[in-house]
Amino acid sequence: MSKLKTLVPALALLFVPSLAFAAGDAGAGGGGMVGLAAGLCIGLAALGCGLGQGRLADSALSGMARNPSAAGGIRTSMMLALAFPESLVLFCFVIAFLLIGKI
């Protein structure tokens, strides 16, 4: 239940800026939905990336704590693995800009 209490305000923060962005171009005839899609694209990608990177860092740090001699290999793998979710957010950022270009 406590996760739900933190998830609801986080989802509200995702929707409020995207709806405000969508309302700004309501006269474009359907442009509001494209603005909503662009806002949700960035918001959900950032949310997923943050959660994924947090879990990745947690697992890597607990692995380093259990086996300090393997810390160098774990750190290298962690840095490489952190680049993948971040690149997905950048792809969503590009897609959002392409959607905005359709308005």
Image (cartoon, grey):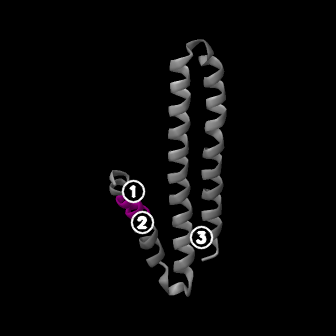
At label 2, the amino acid type is: Pro
Q: Is residue 12 located in the magenta-colored stretch of the structure? A: yes
The residue that appears at 59% across and 18% down in the rendered structure is 71
User: Magenta residues, as a range?
Assistant: 8-15
The answer for how far apart the CA atoms under marks 2 and 3 are is 15 Å
Q: Which mark is residue 7?
A: 1
The answer for how far apart the CA atoms under marks 2 and 1 are is 16 Å
Counting from the top left corner in percent of width and height, residue 95 is at: 65, 62
The answer for how far apart the CA atoms under marks 1 and 3 are is 27 Å
Secondary structure state at the residue bearing disc 3: helix
Which quarter of the figure is the N terminus placed in? bottom left
Q: Quadrant of residue 17?
A: bottom left
Mark 3: few, some, or many residues within 10 Å (few <14, many ≥20)?
some
The residue wearing badge 3 is 100
The residue wearing badge 2 is 17
* Contact, mark 1 vs mark 3 (Cβ under 8 Å): no
